[in-house]
Image (cartoon, rainbow, N blue to C red):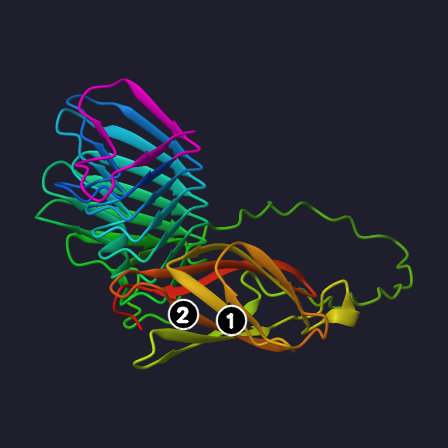
């Protein structure tokens, strides 16, 4: 893959005006803060295709990905990618854009994490198994008199100033399996999927026996406890005013896993990415000054643990991504906030 650095002044990381298909894989596009300052500026003159996989787009002055296709409908596919600390949106789908996003994270962006907004034609975005956190808006569908649609399934929307924004004629369509909580204003989808009716088989004639056998007893099934859906840990965030720190309590929240000896017990914290942050963990003795990916074991297996996130540079977003391991398994999550969140 490529590492494309804008050094704070570059105009666009990748700019496309004419292409059939473009593939961006295993890359980093960082620090393009000129004008317009997009990580990927995809504005083909005719219908085209863009595929982005395992790529990080961060610290850009515009959007991580900006899509506008005046000459015809263009499709964009994004998978396992991250959009962090961009001044505008994580992904901005505009005129004639059809964008699908899976297994991706938008965090700490100044505008919306995921945005569909059309001035002409229509804009559509489909989000599956993704996270939008600590943005100005988690996800948004809006338009200047023309339709824009965002469809969401298994999406987590948390710690944004506004969770969901869908002013007319925008439509946020939910498949009713999402998590939207802990935002300044949560908002809500304005359209939902209707359940599919279950087909029934026609009745068949039943012959009446001449002799009625004695009924046999059927044992009632026993209920089996199952774990909560991800994330199976609770997060309580407390900004500490004037200190640029965010105190977070992580709590195990099990519901009867196969390993019943470790229910409601935290086993370890694995920090996978820290952006503009250091972290202290209230272990005994304390683990302090974490600034790079590392694993902190919790040998006492507490039910909860407190971590303190310190912002390194004022005026920039702070994000800490980690995997919490408890008695039920591994639970990816994150904490942080935008430039003025704490």
Residue 310, which numbered label? 2
User: In which quarter of the view is residue 300 placed?
Assistant: bottom right
- Is the Cβ of the residue at disc 2 closer than 8 Å to that at disc 1? yes
User: Against 138, is 1 above or below?
Assistant: above
Is residue 319 found inside the magenta-colored segment of the image? no
Q: Is 44 left or right of 101, judged from the image as shown?
A: left
Element type where label 2 sits in the image: strand
Quarter of the image with the C terminus in it: bottom left
The residue lying toward the viewer, choosing from 119 and 133, is: 133
Give the extent of the magenta segment.
Answer: 1-27
Please report the residue visible at 12 percent of the width from the left and 44 percent of the height from the top.
146
The residue lying toward the viewer, choosing from 186 and 81, is: 81
Element type where label 1 sits in the image: strand
Quarter of the image with the N terminus in it: top left
Count of picture labels? 2
The residue under label 1 is 280
What is the C-alpha distance between the residues marked 2 and 1?
8 Å
User: Against 179, is 10 above or below?
Assistant: above
| Residue 285 percent location from the top left of the image | 64, 77
| Residue 112 percent location from the top left of the image | 25, 55
Is residue 4 found inside the magenta-colored segment of the image? yes
Please report the residue visible at 45 percent of the width from the left and 37 percent of the height from the top.
54
Chain-order first, disc 2 or disc 1: 1
User: In which quarter of the view is residue 260 placed?
Assistant: bottom right
Q: Is 9 left or right of 222, judged from the image as shown?
A: left
User: Against 200, is 227 above or below?
Assistant: below
| Residue 91 percent location from the top left of the image | 28, 45
């Amino acid at each position: 893959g490529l590492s494309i650095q804008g050094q704070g002044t570059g105009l666009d990381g990748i700019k496309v005006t004419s292409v059939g298909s473009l593939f961006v894989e295993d890359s980093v596009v960082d620090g393009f803060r000129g004008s317009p300052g997009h990580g990927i500026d995809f504005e083909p003159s005719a219908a085209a295709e863009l595929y982005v996989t395992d790529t990080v787009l961060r610290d850009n002055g515009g959007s991580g990905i900006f899509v506008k296709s005046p000459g015809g409908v263009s499709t964009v596919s994004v998978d396992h990618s991250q959009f962090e600390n961009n001044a505008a949106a994580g992904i901005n789908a505009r005129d004639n854009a059809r964008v699908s996003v899976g297994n991706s994270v938008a965090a700490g962006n100044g505008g919306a994490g995921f945005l569909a907004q059309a001035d002409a034609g229509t804009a559509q975005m489909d989000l599956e198994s993704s996270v939008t956190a600590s943005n100005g808006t988690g996800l948004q569908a809006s338009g200047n008199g023309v339709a824009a649609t965002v469809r969401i399934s298994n999406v987590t929307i948390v710690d944004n100033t506004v969770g969901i924004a869908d002013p007319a004629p925008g439509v946020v369509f939910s498949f009713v399996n999402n998590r939207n909580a802990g935002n300044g204003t949560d908002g809500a989808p304005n359209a939902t999927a209707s359940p599919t009716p279950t087909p029934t088989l026609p009745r068949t004639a039943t012959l009446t026996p001449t002799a009625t056998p004695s009924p046999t007893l059927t044992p009632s099934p026993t209920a089996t406890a199952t774990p909560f859906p991800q994330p199976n840990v609770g997060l309580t965030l407390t900004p500490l005013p004037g200190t640029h720190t965010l105190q977070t309590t992580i709590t195990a929240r099990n519901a009867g896993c196969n390993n019943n000896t470790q229910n409601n017990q935290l086993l370890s914290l694995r920090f996978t990415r820290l952006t503009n942050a250091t972290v202290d963990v209230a272990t005994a003795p304390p683990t302090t000054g974490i600034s790079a990916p590392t694993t902190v074991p919790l040998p006492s297996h507490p039910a909860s643990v407190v971590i303190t996130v310190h912002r390194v540079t004022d005026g920039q977003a702070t994000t800490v991504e980690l995997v919490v391991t408890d008695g039920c398994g591994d639970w990816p999550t994150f904490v942080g906030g935008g430039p003025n969140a704490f």
